Image (spheres, rainbow, N blue to C red):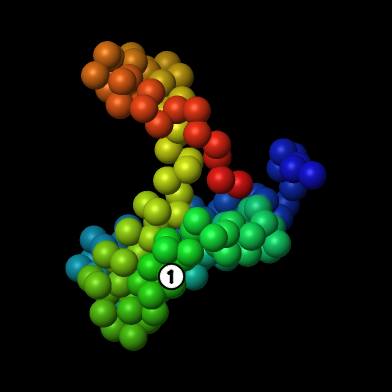
Amino acid sequence: MVSFEMNDRKKIGLGLTGFGIFFSCLGIVFFFDEGLLAMGNILFFSGVTLTIGFKPTMQFFMKRQNYKGTISFGLGFFCVIIGWPIVGMLLEGYGFIVLFSGFWPTLAVFLQKIPVLGWLFQQPYIRSFFDRYRGRRVPV
């Protein structure tokens, strides 16, 4: 059963996910600093795990259609840990796009409903781009 209530575990998970994204961005700004990138990866993964739960996280990463993204993300994480941050971030970026590509339709609907910027995303050319991916099922 999916629970949409915001308990303390989910709040901590969202905070860890946010800090993970922050440290990853900071690691990129500081010319691919291995320590910041590794900390960002650990915080991001632990935050996602706390937010949606351990079992749904494992089910998401172990789905057959997500194997390519999971392996790419894992290899990228390993490359960052051993000191190859640029190669690692490229692999992680590819893995992130493959893993979370099912969420783009949800993001498109959200962007079109933003009061100030929504008009930009409702322009005919941009809207046709978003409409191509609408109607697909969200993977979680």
Between 46 and 64, the one lying in front of the other is 64
Q: Is 28 on the left or on the right of 61, as rendered?
A: left
* Quadrant housing residue 72: bottom left
Quadrant in the picture for the N terminus:
top right
Question: Looking at the image, can residue 35 be seen?
Answer: no
Q: Is residue 38 above or below residue 43?
A: below
Q: Name which residue type carries label 1.
A: Ile
Q: Residue at x 34, y 85 (%)?
A: 82
* Residue 117 pos. (x, y %): 34, 20
Q: Residue at position x 45%, y 33% from top?
A: 105
The image shows residue 50 at horizontal and vertical percentages of: 65, 59
Q: Nearer the viewer, residue 80 or 105?
A: 105
Q: Residue furthest right?
A: 1
In the image, taking residue 7 as reference, residue 82 lies left or right, namely: left
Image location (x, y in percent) of residue 41: 44, 67
Quick check: 99 above or below 85? above
Residue at the spot x=56%, y=45% of the render?
Answer: 139
Is 127 on the left or on the right of 140, as rendered?
A: left
For image coordinates 29% across by 83% down, the residue present is 83
**Is residue 53 placed above or below 118 in the rendered structure?**
below
Element type at mark 1: helix
**Residue at image mark 1:** 71
Quick one: 32 or 111, which is closer to the camera? 111
